[in-house]
Image (spheres, grey):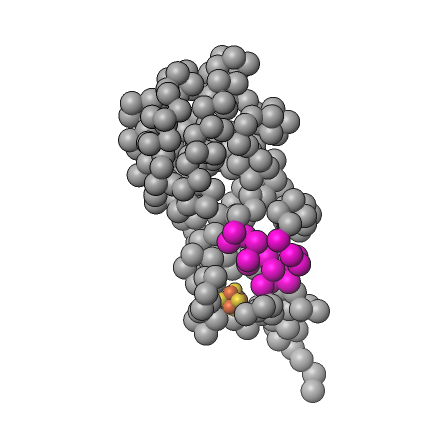
Amino acid sequence: MIKNKSSRKLVSTKVRGKIDFQFTLKQLKKNYPDAHCALDYKNPFELLIATILSAQCTDERVNMVTRVLFKSYPTPLSIAHLKIEALESLIRSTGFYRNKAKNIKQCCQVLVDKYEGHVPRTMEELLELPGVGRKTANVVLGNAYNISSGVVVDTHVTRLANRFGWVKGADAVKIELKLNELCPKSEWIMLSHYLISHGRAVCKARNPDCLNCFLQSSCPKLGV
Ligand code: SF4
């Protein structure tokens, strides 16, 4: 049977157990036109602290906590001067609060001492801040400064990239490098927002809704 052009195109979206990257990006864009960072922030400093707090915590919970925190302590100086017990109590509900409080206080102190209270704009400088890894640095650079430093890899991005066959395993740096390679740099910032939106709405950790998913016919559903 001779296949026409359109059927060849559809088949080509799943090659050797992988879903085609460009096809997927296009579909995600179409289905999540309003994808954006779910953390509330008014400036790079607020986004930095919110992202540190978001480890092992929902964005909704972080937004509740930062609303109260930044009302009384809106600057690195004010948090650096805050007693550690008071900071712990303010952020307790985000989990791992002792470690987070220690990192946030030290981070604010470095911002005050080294950067006059500003958040630096390079990956190298951000990675030197206590509590900041590549994920947090990419979130801040991409969303607060519109600098494409790399794709943000969180739990949703990890899960979907594995199910799509783009990566294998949970090593965040390896996943980021692979996604940076697959994705045009101009889309790095938005890619994680699209994947996170799809991970929350359809391709959930438990019971992904494959039957009603717009990627159903092309997705290899690895591990599902
Ligand atoms: S919900 Fe199913 S079909 Fe859709 S992206 Fe996830 S694993 Fe693939």
Q: Is residue 8 visible?
A: yes
Residue displayed at 70% across by 69% down: 16
Residue displayed at 56% across by 26% down: 129
Indicate the quadrant containing the N terminus: top left, top right, bottom left or bottom right. bottom right
Quarter location, residue 18: bottom right
Residue 156 screen position, x and y as percent: 51, 54
Residue 9 or residue 98, whichever sits in front: 98
In the displayed structure, does residue 206 sit left or right of residue 224? left
User: In the rendered image of this protein, does residue 2 appear above or below residue 45?
Assistant: below
Residue displayed at 45% across by 62% down: 204
Residue 24 or residue 4, whichever sits in front: 24
Residue 186 or residue 114, whichever sits in front: 114
Q: Is residue 180 visible?
A: no
Quarter location, residue 222: bottom right
Residue displayed at 37% across by 20% down: 83
- Residue range in magenta is 155-170
Q: How many marks?
A: 0
Residue 103 screen position, x and y as percent: 49, 29
Residue 151 among magenta residues: no
User: In the rendered image of this protein, does residue 52 appear above or below residue 224?
Assistant: above
In the displayed structure, does residue 18 sit left or right of residue 24? right
Residue 97 screen position, x and y as percent: 41, 36
Residue 149 or residue 58, whichever sits in front: 58
Indicate the quadrant containing the C terminus: top left, top right, bottom left or bottom right. bottom right
User: In the rendered image of this protein, does residue 18 appear above or below residue 97?
Assistant: below
Residue 78 screen position, x and y as percent: 37, 17
